[in-house]
Image (cartoon, rainbow, N blue to C red):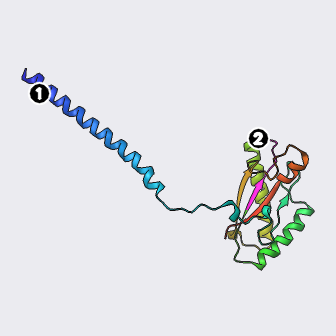
Amino acid sequence: MKSSSFLALVLGGVFTLISVSACSHKAAKTEEPAAASSIDIAPIKDSEVLSSDKENASGLQTVHFKYNEYALDKADLTVLKQNVKVLKANPQLAIQVEGHCDARGGIQYNLALGEKRANSVKKYLVKSGIAAARITTLSLGKEKPIDSSDSEAAYAKNRRANFVITK
């Protein structure tokens, strides 16, 4: 009888330890997000973004591409030459070149194409004397269209590389 009482007491103690341990583990997990959410980070408002798409990026202009292409044509080079002048006149500016695509094509394909567009613009800027450290690139694929209409005119507006001032 003593051994069965002792066994019951031990099992009861083990069960209590497991329950307490599980509860304290859960409490730690629920406290972690609360601590992370107490960090004071001011969100950047969309209206504060200085972008060539919004025509408020110190004179920098958006470059547009032909369907399924990332090579720069004569019109792109004209725009980029002007952008180089702006960047040389404002050496404190740092920019992000964002590559965009139209609504056609798959997500992965358009992300890759947007990256090629942004990188072709960056390569031109660097060859023109703008420090590579001032330029970051980002592909947004088809995720941020200027015009969400389903027309060739809308597609043409969305195939672009725009400039966002980051500093």
Compared to residue 136, the image places residue 82 above or below, namely below
Q: Relative to 159, is 44 on the left or the right?
A: left
Mark 2: give few (<14), some (14-19) or many (20+) Cα within 10 Å. few
The residue lying furthest to the left in this view is 2
- Identify the residue at image location x=12%, y=22%: 4
Q: Relative to 82, is 35 on the left or the right?
A: left
Q: Which residues are magenta?
A: 97-105
Q: Is residue 100 magenta?
A: yes
- Residue beneath disc 1: 6
The image quadrant of residue 164 is bottom right
Q: Position of residue 91 (x, y in %)?
A: 72, 78
Distance from disc 1 to disc 2, alpha carbons, whole Å, reads 67 Å
Q: Position of residue 137 (x, y in %)?
A: 71, 60
Q: Dividing the image into 4 quarters, which one contains the N terminus?
A: top left
- Residue beneath disc 2: 106
Dot 1 falls on a residue whose secondary structure is helix
The residue lying furthest to the right in this view is 74
Dot 2 falls on a residue whose secondary structure is loop
Which numbered tag is attached to residue 88?
none
- Identify the residue at image location x=77%, y=72%: 58
The residue lying furthest to the bottom in this view is 89
